[in-house]
């Protein structure tokens, strides 16, 4: 039983860790790739 | 005489078909589609669209400036847009690189229609049919009982770490499945009855849950693979199990080690399909950054599989948007197959078989259950227990 509750808790823990890791740390949220770096004036 | 009649009928019926293949009268329509072209395309027929892709205008044939209505150029607006559609123009977009350069892509509408139509119908249908079949099986076979009742004593089947890995995988899969289904069906099942606001809120939450819980699923998938792959290699015992149909209908008890063949199907199904759904999922989470289908199609073409199945050669060059469309369609198809499999797995592990849930619940299973369903595994465990007891 304990393993099951620990498992479910781990799902949320990993989800939150992934969310904060990808948005706050790795800065995936800023969309840097598409925010105008490739603007060419023709 | 009858043969001649038949031959004549066949030839006459071939007439209209042949007319589609021969050059259609296009002197008045040129590069524009006719009603027949549109109907054929919507009916999913393959049409020769060279009348469009070839009608791109010719700048060198522009009228002289002194001519009447000169010079309007040698390329009309329609021809310009056809050139853009067929990647024959030398225009470029001012941002977003390769992705932004695709201003028209013909794959968009068929994909959209697939997602709105067959994907929902067949995917949802598969789940409903699975549920129905499980119901029929329960009515016909009933709950598989322990013959003669449980022994009362237990042995350890799964350690804590094994159960932990399973429940991380199971818990994340349930969340991913529900949020995925909401994403596909929310617009047609929720919004009309509960309003667009509720649908929107649920789907925003679903997207967050789906994108972030996916990492837990992928980690647990690796963990489960590492833990149990050795026990899931098929062997001769499985052949005996298969021949007796797992004892599901015959009510016999074929021998089995830690995992029987039915469980091995679930294991390998989850690993292979789970890896596939993860790969397409990663491609969807990082749009345009992880295209996989062009390369996959090239490999398949080299093997010769698509041609053998009658699909001809698959496209090996596709726009970033087409890659994303394939990724979404594949992700959903694989997910539906997995959900159907797991529904059967959940059934047999809970309602379907007495004593089965304990294996993952507490890790301790009844000895009589083990003797009947996993006799070879039971012998191994008991032998180890006797050997580890100190000699007296």
Image: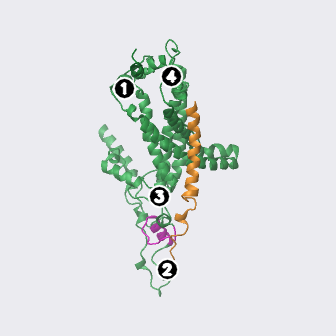
Chain colours: A orange, B green
Magenta stretch: give its range.
B77-95
Query: Do the numbered discs 2 and 1 sit on residues whose CB atoms are within 8 Å?
Result: no
Q: Nearer the viewer, mark 3 or mark 4?
A: 4
Q: Is residue B259 left or right of residue A25?
A: left
Q: Which of the two discs, 4 and 1, sits closer to the camera?
A: 4
Residue matched to label 2: B72
Please report whichever mark, 1 or 3, sits nearer to the chain's N-terminal start: 1
Task: Name the residue that disc number 3 marks.
Answer: B289
Percent x, y of residue B260: 41, 26
Res B160 visible: yes
Earlier residue among tags 4 and 2: 2
Distance (Cα) linking label 4 and label 1: 22 Å
Circle 4 residue: B365
Sequence-wise, the earlier of marks 3 and 2 is 2
Q: Secondary structure at mark 4?
A: strand
Residue appearing at x 45%, y 16% in the figure: B251
Q: Earlier in the sequence, mark 2 or mark 1?
A: 2
Eye-nearest disc, 4 or 2: 4
The crowding category of the residue bearing disc 4, from other C-alpha atoms within 10 Å (few below 14, some 14 to 19, many at least 20), is many
Q: Is B4 in front, or is B33? A: B33
Task: Tell me the number on the disc at residue B238.
Answer: 1
CA distance separating discs 4 and 2: 85 Å
Farthest residue to the bottom: give it. Answer: B66
Question: Are there few (<14), some (14-19), or many (20+) residues within 10 Å of tag 3?
Answer: few
């Amino acid at each position: 039983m304990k393993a099951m509750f620990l498992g479910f808790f781990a799902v949320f823990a990993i989800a939150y860790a992934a969310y904060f890791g990808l948005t706050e740390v790795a800065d995936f949220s800023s969309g840097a790739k598409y925010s105008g770096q490739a603007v060419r004036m023709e | 005489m009858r043969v001649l009649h038949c031959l004549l009928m066949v030839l006459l019926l071939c007439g209209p078909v042949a007319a589609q293949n021969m050059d259609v009268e296009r002197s008045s329509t040129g590069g524009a589609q006719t009603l027949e072209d549109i109907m054929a395309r919507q009916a999913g027929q393959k049409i020769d669209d060279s009348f469009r892709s070839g009608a791109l205008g010719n700048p060198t044939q522009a009228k002289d400036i002194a001519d009447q209505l000169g010079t309007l150029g040698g390329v009309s607006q329609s021809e310009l847009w056809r050139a853009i559609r067929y990647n024959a123009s030398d225009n470029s977009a001012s941002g977003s690189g390769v992705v932004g350069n695709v201003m028209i892509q013909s794959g968009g509408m068929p994909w959209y229609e697939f997602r709105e139509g067959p994907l929902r119908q067949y995917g949802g249908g598969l789940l409903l049919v699975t549920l129905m079949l499980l119901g029929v099986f329960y009515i016909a076979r009933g709950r598989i009982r322990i013959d003669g009742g449980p022994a009362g004593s237990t042995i350890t089947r799964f350690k804590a770490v094994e159960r932990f890995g399973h429940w991380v995988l199971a818990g994340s899969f349930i969340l991913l499945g529900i949020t995925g289904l909401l994403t596909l069906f929310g617009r047609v099942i929720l919004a009309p009855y509960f309003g667009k606001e509720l649908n929107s809120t649920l789907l925003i939450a679903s997207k967050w849950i789906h994108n972030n819980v996916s990492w837990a699923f992928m980690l647990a998938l690796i963990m489960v693979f590492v833990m149990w792959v050795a026990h899931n290699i098929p062997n001769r015992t499985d052949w005996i199990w298969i021949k007796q149909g797992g004892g599901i209908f015959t009510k016999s008890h074929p021998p089995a080690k830690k995992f029987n063949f039915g469980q091995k199907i679930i294991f390998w199904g989850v690993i292979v399909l789970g890896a596939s759904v993860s790969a397409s999922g990663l491609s969807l989470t990082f749009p345009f950054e992880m295209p996989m289908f062009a390369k996959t199609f090239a490999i398949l073409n080299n093997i010769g599989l698509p041609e053998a199945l009658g699909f001809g050669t698959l496209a090996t060059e596709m726009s970033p948007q087409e890659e994303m469309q394939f990724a979404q369609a594949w992700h959903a198809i694989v997910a539906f197959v997995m959900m159907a499999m797991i529904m059967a797995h959940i059934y047999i592990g809970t309602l379907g078989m007495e004593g089965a849930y304990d294996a993952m619940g507490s890790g301790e299973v009844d000895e009589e259950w083990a003797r009947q369903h996993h006799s070879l595994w039971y012998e191994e465990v008991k032998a180890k227990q006797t050997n580890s007891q100190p000699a007296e």
